Every structure is written in C-alpha cells, then in structure tokens.
Image (cartoon, helix red, strand yellow):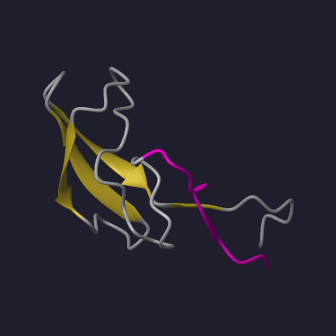
C-alpha cells in the first residue's frame, strides 16, 4: 500500500509544503473562489479540514491528502 502524498507544493499559497497541513485559503468547490477561511484543521476525519467561503457563504470540507499511486490499497 502506498503512502499518501501531500498535494503538490509550490509558490501557490493554497498548497502548503508541510505534509498534512491545510492551506490558508482552500478553493471553494461550489464557486471556485479563494476568499475562504479555515474553520477547523480537522473535520470528521483527520485528512479533512473545514472551511467557510466568504464569496458564496457556504461551508465545505477540503481533503488535505491525495494518493497518487496506482494501487488502491485494498
């Protein structure tokens, strides 16, 4: 089973370089805005952070980890 890898790091502030660290402003899945606020670094799962979008005024969960391996790990 492959280890989870953090989202790609770069100069973009929405992608942190520290594994498992939620970004300061995650993109909203509803309006694609970046005027978001981190409400809780841990949601229902440890791999999820909770955000609030100031643009469309909607709460959403952001997955902090992605597995880029081909092995589903079952």
- Residues 7 and 16: in front is 16
Q: Quadrant of residue 65?
A: bottom right
Is 38 contained in the magenta span?
no
- Residues 48 and 37: in front is 37
Q: Position of residue 3 (x, y in %)?
A: 71, 78
Residue 39, above or below 1: above
Q: Residue at x 85, y 66 (%)?
A: 71
How many dots with numbers?
A: 0
Residue 37, above or below 49: above
Q: Position of residue 41 (x, y in %)?
A: 26, 66
Q: Residue at x 46, y 71 (%)?
A: 20
Looking at the magenta stretch, what is its main secondary structure? loop
Is residue 8 rendered to the left or right of residue 36? right
Q: Position of residue 9 (x, y in %)?
A: 57, 57
The quadrant in which the C terminus is found is bottom right
The quadrant in which the N terminus is found is bottom right
Residue 47, above or below 38: below
Is 10 contained in the magenta span?
yes
Is residue 52 rendered to the left or right of residue 43? left
- Residues 26 and 69: in front is 26
Residue 27, above or below 31: below
Q: Residue at x 37, y 36 (%)?
A: 27
Read off the magenta span: 1-12
Is residue 49 rendered to the left or right of residue 4? left
Looking at this view, name the residue that lies furthest to the right: 70
């Amino acid at each position: 089973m492959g280890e989870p890898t953090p989202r790609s790091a770069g100069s973009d502030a929405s992608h942190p370089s520290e594994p498992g660290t939620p970004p300061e402003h995650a993109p909203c899945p509803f309006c694609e805005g970046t005027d978001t606020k981190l409400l809780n670094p841990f949601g229902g799962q440890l791999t999820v952070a909770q955000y609030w979008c100031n643009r469309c005024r909607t709460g959403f969960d952001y997955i902090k980890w992605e597995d880029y391996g081909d092995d589903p790990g079952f």
